Image: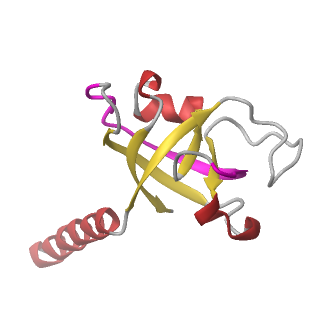
Amino acid sequence: MALKMSLKIAFTVVACLLSVALATPGTATFYNSYIPSACYGNKPQGVMIAAASDPLWANGAICGKVFNVTCTGPTNPVPHPCTGRSVVVKIVDHCPGCGGTLDLSKEAFATIANPVAGIIKIDYRQV
């Protein structure tokens, strides 16, 4: 029984480490006009959403995919913008030429960082 429990704990630790290791670094900005969207038109998708930058867009193939996003630090003089939390967002839009990897809804951005920062460093991974 103890061996089973030890194996479960070891597996959980390895799985957590792999999920962190598989995160991709990037930057995030935010927006606050959610409709219409490139993926869903005038159909609302809630507020925990994001728009994908050109490198991620892939002609819309990313639409509907879900990502876990974590703030990892500032990109400008705003000290300590991160809240220490992560957020899960659904890709609903395209952000052509935007300044970040992901353009988060203002609500999603505020969950992980102080909106005063405007742009932050992130780690993101598909879930």
Residue at horizontal 75 percent and vertical 35 percent from the top: 34
Location of residue 59 by image quarter = bottom right
Residue at screen point 33% across, 29% down? 81
- Residue 98 % position (x, y): 61, 46
Pinpoint residue 31: horizontal percent, then vertical percent.
Answer: 63, 33
13 or 126: nearer the eye?
Answer: 126
In the image: residue 27, left or right of residue 50: left
Q: Relative to residue 43, is residue 68 depicted above or below? A: below
Residue in the image at 52% along x and 53% along y: 101
Q: Is residue 24 magenta?
A: no
Q: Is residue 34 left or right of residue 28?
A: right
Work out whether residue 13 or residue 101 is closer to the camera in this orientation and state it. Answer: 101
Percent position (x, y) of residue 76?
34, 33
Farthest left residue in view: 2
Most foreground residue, 120 or 19: 120
- How are the colours assigned in the image? secondary structure
Give percent across and percent down for residue 79.
Answer: 26, 26
Residue drawn at (67%, 63%) of the image? 57
Position above or below: 127 against 111: below
Give the magenta range. 79-97
Q: Nearer the viewer, residue 109 or 14?
A: 109
In the displayed orientation, state which residue is furthest to the top. Answer: 116
User: Which corner quadrant holds the N terminus?
Assistant: bottom left
Q: Viewed as shown, does residue 12 lie left or right of 3? A: right
All told, the count of numbered labels is 0
